[in-house]
């Protein structure tokens, strides 16, 4: 039997540094526009049941993918409703326009829960790394080590990416995938970002990179302002028409995915990091100051509303809001340091941001004027 612990807090950004307060009466009435209400959802007595890897909200439920299956909660009362796929580690969840819930089960492949069924079933896929549901359909496009697998009408087919650049073999070693409003798919590979216009047309976008050898460093120029070539997350936000690109060397935001060659279409954020250089015949790492106070240059995920940017790392959740940077982590009494997933659910009066961590789910409510 699960018991739910529900904690309400207030996040104040008024002073420029983010603080957590358990007493909502501490907030100043004239600073309401600078506040985000904040809640934490945990399961007791065993928190291991909600080591959350991913989260979505659909069908009036909150779906949480954990190291031990999928938990569904009532979205308003937060009461636990059902536990699916026990003893399976869940890597991603998504819902289709036809109300199918799809799940990436790590080392097992793609699973599906149709709206008229009571449990998930395996689609028979190979191991997948990521997936996205094609807009307006129940078709699933999967990132794999051998190309893009498409699940359509209960069968799979594979698209091979036509490799470009210096390392064309990496083109089909795909880590992440998403789709924009024009129908283009974006593929984050082990080296470079591909735009898949159709099943036979691809464009490669590369960041600057280095080839480090025994006693030399070769600096190579990319063909775009992209900040990194190895991808942790790709997220397209239709309401903003932004593509958020989380890499191992910072966050890139493509503000106009229809014009990626335009340098003005790109914004990048980095934390302090290292860059290889040669000193006295030896390769050493030179410290480079980032352009933001991010606690880490290794970005796991990101989310954006009209007023706020949320950036998840292994060292906390950084929020850029009202031209101020703040970071939530264990030191500031946040639920956890490592941010596994970020999910946005829009309501008429507020945005709700769900934050998956290995210690539970955190919930941030942005009021309507903060959309």
Image (cartoon, rainbow, N blue to C red):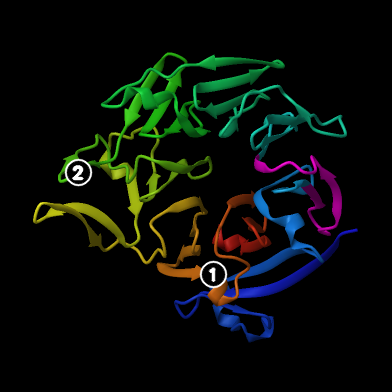
Residue 156 belongs to magenta span: no
Residue positioned most to the right? 1
One can see residue 64 in this view: no
Q: Position of residue 8 (x, y in %)?
A: 71, 72
> Which quadrant of the structure image shows residue 354?
bottom right
Residue at 61% from the left image edge and 50% from the top image edge: 343
In the image shown, does 203 or 211 lie closer to the viewer?
211
Which mark is drawn over residue 329?
Answer: 1
Q: How crowded is mark 1: few (under 14 residues within 10 Å), some or many (20 or more)?
A: many
| 331 versus 211 height, above or below | below
Instruction: Tell me if 160 is positioned left or right of 224 in this view.
Output: right
Residue at 64% from the left image edge and 23% from the top image edge: 139
Q: Position of residue 201 (x, y in %)?
A: 39, 17
| 139 versus 302 height, above or below | above
Please name the residue that numbered disc 2 is placed on. 214
In the image shown, does 160 or 214 lie closer to the viewer?
214
One can see residue 161 in this view: yes
Q: Residues within 10 Å of mark 2 (few under 14, many from 20)?
A: few
Which tag is nearer the camera, tag 2 or tag 1? 2
Residue at 47% from the left image edge and 30% from the top image edge: 174
């Amino acid at each position: 039997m699960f018991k739910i612990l529900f904690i309400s807090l207030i996040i104040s950004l008024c002073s420029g540094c983010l603080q957590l307060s358990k007493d909502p009466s501490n907030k100043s009435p004239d600073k309401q526009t600078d506040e985000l209400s904040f809640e934490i959802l945990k399961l007791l007595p065993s928190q291991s049941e909600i080591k959350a890897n991913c989260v979505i909200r659909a069908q009036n439920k909150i779906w949480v993918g954990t190291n031990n299956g999928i938990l569904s909660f009532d979205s308003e009362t937060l009461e636990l409703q059902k536990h699916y796929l026990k003893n399976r580690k869940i890597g991603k969840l998504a819902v289709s326009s036809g109300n199918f819930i799809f799940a990436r089960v790590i080392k097992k492949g793609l699973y599906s829960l149709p709206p008229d069924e009571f449990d998930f079933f395996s689609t028979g896929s190979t191991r997948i790394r990521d997936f996205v549901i094609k807009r307006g359909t129940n078709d699933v496009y999967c990132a794999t080590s051998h190309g893009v697998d498409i699940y359509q009408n209960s069968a799979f087919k594979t698209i091979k990416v036509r490799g470009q650049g210096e390392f064309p073999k990496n083109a089909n070693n795909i880590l992440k995938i998403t789709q924009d409003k024009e129908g283009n798919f974006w593929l984050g590979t082990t080296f470079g970002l591909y735009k898949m216009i159709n099943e036979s047309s691809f464009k490669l976008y590369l960041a600057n990179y280095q080839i480090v050898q025994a006693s030399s460093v070769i600096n190579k120029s990319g063909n775009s302002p992209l900040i990194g070539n190895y991808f942790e997350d790709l997220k397209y936000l239709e309401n903003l028409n932004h593509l958020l690109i989380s890499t191992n060397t910072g966050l890139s935001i493509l503000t106009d995915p229809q014009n990626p060659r335009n340098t003005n279409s790109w914004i990048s954020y980095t934390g302090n990091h290292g860059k290889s250089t040669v000193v006295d015949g030896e390769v050493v790492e030179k410290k480079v100051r980032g352009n933001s106070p991010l606690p880490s240059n290794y970005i796991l995920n990101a989310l954006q509303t009209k007023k706020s940017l949320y950036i998840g790392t292994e060292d906390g959740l950084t929020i850029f809001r009202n031209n101020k940077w703040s970071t939530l982590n264990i030191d500031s009494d946040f639920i956890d340091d490592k941010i596994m997933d970020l999910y946005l659910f829009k309501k008429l009066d507020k945005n709700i941001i769900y934050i998956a961590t290995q210690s539970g789910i955190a919930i941030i409510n942005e009021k309507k004027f903060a959309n």
